[in-house]
Image (cartoon, rainbow, N blue to C red):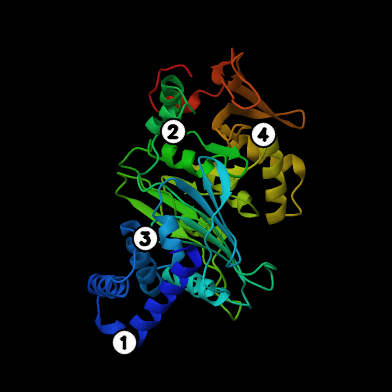
Amino acid sequence: MDFNEEQQFVADIKQYVTDNLTLSEIDDEDLELKIQEIVYQRLSGQYCSIDQQVSIVQQVFSSIRGFGLLDNIMNDDTITEVMINGYQNIFIEQNGRLTKLQKRFESERKLEDVIQRIVGLAGREVNQANPICDTRLPDGSRVNVVLPPIALCGPTITIRKFSKTPMTIEKLIAYGSLTREIADKLEILVRAKYNIFISGGTGSGKTTFLNALSNYIPKDERVITIEDSAELQITGVQNLVSLETRNANASGVGEITIRDLIKSSLRMRPERIVVGEVRGGEALDMLQAMNTGHDGSLSTGHANSTEDMLSRLETMVLQGAAGLPLEAIRQQIASAVDIIIHLSRLRDKSRKTMAITEVVGYENGQIKLNPLFVFEEDENSTLEKVSGSLNRTENKLVNNFKLQLAGFKNEI
């Protein structure tokens, strides 16, 4: 049975099931058994491999109770990202490489049904009046949806999958992104309540790194997490509040932004505020929170280098308060941010920690930086494979006041 025959067979079985069974009265387990019986009966006179039979049953069940074709893709743990450009074009990322799947949805209407099911699960809505939506799947995977007429190629979904097990520093060490020595120093910085900003390009692993770093937060603290779509997996912290933004409804009201949530979190007696990503005017509120006694805050932002992250922060603050003088903004950044960790996705698709830099202060109109660790390639690097390590510079940590305050006598 080739692909087209299989898809027609799946459509026929689905039609038969929906016409002949009272779906509202059957639970998931019984429905799957019924579909299995019907599929085996229909295939009794022809050859079909066991794998294909199982696949057909799963496709029929998913098209009725799940996300259809998407279920099979999401169940493959080797896939890290899914890109659906209209119902006929599905691309996946595996091991850092993009490939096109030889599968497609039955129709544009079917893909739209799946989108509405995904969006509805998180209590959000997406339609022609509000055609862009950020949401998440029940497993925490991040989802972006864009509908026509904004998306010219048809309904578009981008899904960033996340591991079922929380990312830990140990895993980052195993992947070669960090060494044990550097991880121990980062743990001290987190425990001593240094304000840490993680920068990097798209797909460089910022949220993954933030997840790992946040698990160094002492378990007896009150932590507020703020995200567009909740995906952080902080474990062990009992006094944890997770906040998530909300899009405006069809009438254009009811929107809750990251900025709103940061302001609200300051009234919730936080010991730490963790913002998944700052990308606009909320940067000003984040910096003010860091400057008003909420030390130990963590966040991420898009940038191509440590220096670029600072200028991006300046731009974002201006989005929130256009009248502020640049000098005041730079002073605010210099006093709020203590450490910037820059990540990058390199030419061989590997993700590396490129630099760990201290923000020392503000002098002569510029923010002063003190590089502590810098990634350097070695002689084994080629065009296809990057080889190197994150090396300690000769610079010492300048602002060690928080270390002393927290009782740490270690040198960073």
Mark 1 = which residue?
Answer: 20
Q: Earlier in the sequence, mark 3 or mark 1?
A: 1
Q: Are the residues flagged by discs 1 and 2 in contact, CB closer than 8 Å?
A: no
Q: Nearer the viewer, residue 188 or 386?
A: 386
User: What's the mark number on residue 52?
Assistant: 3
Q: Earlier in the sequence, mark 1 or mark 4?
A: 1
Dot 4, how many residues are within 10 Å of its Cα: few (below 14), some (14-19), or many (20+)? some
Disc 1 element: helix
Q: Earlier in the sequence, mark 2 or mark 3?
A: 3
Camera-nearest label, 1 or 4: 1
Residue visible at 44% across and 36% down?
A: 213
Locate the N terminus and report the quarter of the image it occupies.
bottom left
Mark 2 = which residue?
Answer: 190
Camera-nearest label, 2 or 3: 3
Dot 1, how many residues are within 10 Å of its Cα: few (below 14), some (14-19), or many (20+)? few
Disc 2 element: helix
Image height of 209 relative to 248, above or below: above
Q: Which of marks 2 and 4 is nearer the N terminus?
A: 2
Q: Which of marks 1 and 2 is nearer the N terminus?
A: 1
Mark 4 = which residue?
Answer: 305
Residue visible at 35% across and 51% down?
A: 240
Cα distance, mark 2 to mark 3? 50 Å
* 361 sits left or right of 300 in the view: right
Disc 3 element: helix
**What amino acid is labelled 4 in the image?**
Ser
Q: Earlier in the sequence, mark 4 or mark 3?
A: 3
**What amino acid is labelled 2 in the image?**
Val
